[in-house]
Structure formats: C-alpha cells, structure tokens
Amino acid sequence: MPRDDDTGGHGREGVRRSLQLMWGTPEESTRGPKPALTVERIVRAAIDMADAEGLTALSMRRIATALGAGAMSLYRYVPNKGVLIDLMVDEVYREDVTAADAVRGDWRERLEAFARQEWALYLRHPWMLQVPQGRPMLGPNSMATTDISLRAVDDIGFTEDEMLAAVVTVSAFVSGLAKMIIEGMQASERTGIADDEWWEIQGEFVGPAVVAGKLPMLTKVGEAGAFNSMFDNFEFGLRCVLDGLGAQIAARRATAADREQ
C-alpha cells in the first residue's frame, strides 16, 4: 500500500522520484485518448486544496475525489504525499520566475523586489511555511528563482559565499516574519479563542506585573500602542536588512579603493 504521509517523499527513493518528476521531460503526447489525469492536474488540485484548507487537510484520497478519480489511480503518477508536496512547492515557485527575471535596478532595488515577491507568495500560499526547508528540494523553478536573485548581488564586492548568504538572509527574514503573521491570523480558527479573549486572558496574569512596575520597557511600548502593530513590521525589518547589506557593501568598496591607492 502506498504511503500517504508528509514525509514519505523524503527517503532516498522519494528524493530521487521527486527530482525525476521535477526535472524530467514533459509528458509526450501519444495517439488515442488523453489520460484522465496528469501530474500537472494533480499538483494544481493539491495546491488549490492546500490554499483553501492548509497542508494538513491534504490527502491523496481527497485530491482524487476533487479530480473525480479513484484514490489508487493517483499513485500511478505521484507515489505518495511527500513527493506531491515537493512538486507543489516547485510549482508555486514557477509563478514568480518570469516576474523575477524582469526585475531591474541596482542590487538594493532588485533584492527588495524579490523580498516583496516572496512575501506575496507566502500570503497566497500560507501552507508553504509548513514545509520544512532545512534541506530544500532543488527543483528547476526554485533553482531558477535563486539563480535570478543571485544576479542582484553579483559584482558588488561580495565573495560567492557572501552572495549566497545575502540572498538567504533576506529570504529568512521574509519567511520568518510571514510565518509569525500567518500563524497569528490562523490562531483564532485553530484554537477557538478570539483575539480579544486571548489577550484578555493573558492580561489577567501579566497585568499585575505591569502595575507593580516589573516590566517597565514592555509597559512603555505597550502604552504607546506598539503591540497593536507588532506583527506588521515588514517594511521596517526589510529596510534594516537591506541597510545592513548596504553597509557591508560600502565597507568592501572602501577597502578595495584603499588598496588601489
């Protein structure tokens, strides 16, 4: 029986099958009736389902039902849910490849554009943040996106290691903040506790510490209303990240200029 779980596609054979499906040649047309299913149709149906209900709602059986097919028929195209998720992730990256390739400007303008594209991607597909990326699957679309982003920091004074680190740093900021915001947006439905009630319960315990003056800095920012927008820090955070990279670039250029003198 095929495995229908979140990790089945990431064993040795699963990795090979995911990469084979992502990097393989397109399905060739043959004479006779077209097959009722294709990998592309299955992946698109899975993305639509995950967008609407989250990754935990995804199952091969439910996807088959949405496509009007038998559950076992899907396994002829995609061996398990783990492989399917790999294909979904790479397909989502394909949405922005053309737009990313069209970005122009200096390094900062280009990295900012890539950050905003990634931010929008997570808002369109929140389930992407549930997919472990410690060892990402190197699909053609994710690699194309990374390759394009690296062009933004080429020939600006960074070593190759630093070029990759710059791109990863920007991406890590975007994904980290997006995860926190989306989890906050989904918390009410997940827990059954509305935001107002959540903070009211917390206030019962934190309030006495505030009154007693034990948390002076938290009291200061709280009274200024900072907590009302604590998860809306994308612009400020992105500016800080890019300013930091800008300082590194300026330092490298200054050092290079000194050496030339």
Image: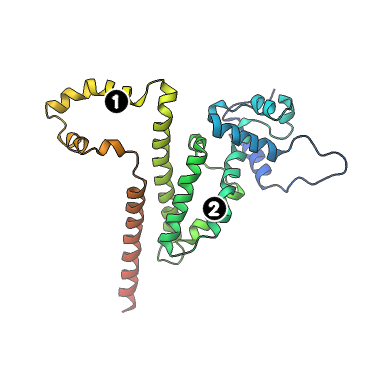
Q: Is residue 214 left or right of residue 182?
A: left
Label 1 sits on what residue type? Trp
Q: What quarter of the picture does the C terminus occupy?
A: bottom left
Residue at 68%, 32% (x, y): give it. Answer: 79
Under circle 2, the secondary element is: helix
- In the image as oriented, which residue stretches furthest toward the left? 212
Which of the two residues, 256 or 45, is positioned nearer the viewer here?
45
Which of the two residues, 32 or 20, is positioned nearer the viewer here?
32
The mark nearer the N terminus, 1 or 2, is 2
* Label 1 vs label 2, nearer the camera: 1
Percent x, y of residue 197: 32, 22
Question: From mark 1 to mark 2, how far is it between C-alphas?
Answer: 40 Å
- In the image as oriented, which residue stretches furthest toward the right? 32
Above/below status of 56 relative to 240:
above
Residue at 56%, 47% (x, y): give it. Answer: 93
Mark 1, other Cα within 10 Å: few <14 / some 14–19 / many ≥20:
few
Q: Are marks 1 and 2 in contact (CB under 8 Å)?
A: no
Percent x, y of residue 196: 32, 25
Label drawn at residue 199: 1
Residue 15 visible in the snapshot = yes
Q: Count the marks: how many?
A: 2
Residue at 40%, 50% (x, y): give it. Answer: 169
Under circle 1, the secondary element is: helix
Mark 2, other Cα within 10 Å: few <14 / some 14–19 / many ≥20:
many
Q: What quarter of the picture does the N terminus occupy?
A: top right
Label drawn at residue 165: none
Percent x, y of residue 260: 34, 77
Label drawn at residue 145: 2
